[in-house]
Amino acid sequence: MGVSAILGPDRGGFHHLGQHRGLGLRPVFLINIILGLVGLLAAFSLLPRDRPSPARRSTPSGAVLLGTSMLALIFGLIQGSPTGGEAFRS
């Protein structure tokens, strides 16, 4: 939060510069693409390669269990908010 408080005025300054040139705010967000590519290249070059062990394999039952649990979690979060939690009260 401290970093965002420091960088916020700078980002606002870029927005102000963009408005004078007719660009608006959108070019400010292009920096995310550049930073993402730099981070991706750094990860590929600096992090060690990891080979998966043959003992760890995914199984169809594990995939179904993971998918079902994620569906239940997301469904609960989506439906719990509009109903105010009515569906979960006993």
Image: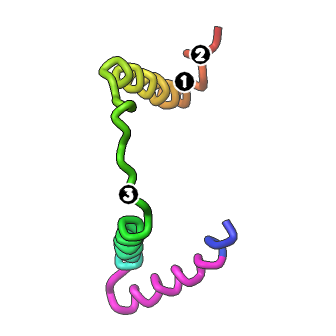
Residue 3 percent coordinates (x, y): 64, 73
**Secondary structure of the residue carrying numbered label 2:** helix
Q: Earlier in the sequence, mark 1 or mark 2?
A: 1
Please provide the residue range marked out in magenta: 6-25
In the displayed structure, 90 sits above or below 68; it is above
How many neighbours does mark 3 have within 10 angstroms: few (below 14), some (14-19), or many (20 or more)? few
Q: Which mark is residue 83?
A: 1
- In three-dimensional space, the C-alpha distance between marks 1 and 2, rounded to whole angstroms, equals 9 Å
Residue 26 percent coordinates (x, y): 36, 74
The residue labelled by disc 3 is: 49
Describe residue 64's horizontal placement relative to residue 84 as left or right. Answer: left
Instruction: Inspect the magenta stretch and tell me whether residue 12 lies in it.
Output: yes
Residue 46 percent coordinates (x, y): 43, 69
Residue 11 seen in this snapshot: yes
Q: Earlier in the sequence, mark 3 or mark 1?
A: 3
Describe residue 72's horizontal placement relative to residue 27 as left or right. Answer: right
Toward which corner of the image does residue 28 lie, by quadrant?
bottom left
Q: Residue at x 35, y 78 (%)?
A: 27
How many neighbours does mark 2 have within 10 angstroms: few (below 14), some (14-19), or many (20 or more)? few
In the displayed structure, 14 sits above or below 70; it is below
Instruction: Inspect the magenta stretch and tell me whether residue 20 lies in it.
Output: yes
The residue labelled by disc 2 is: 88
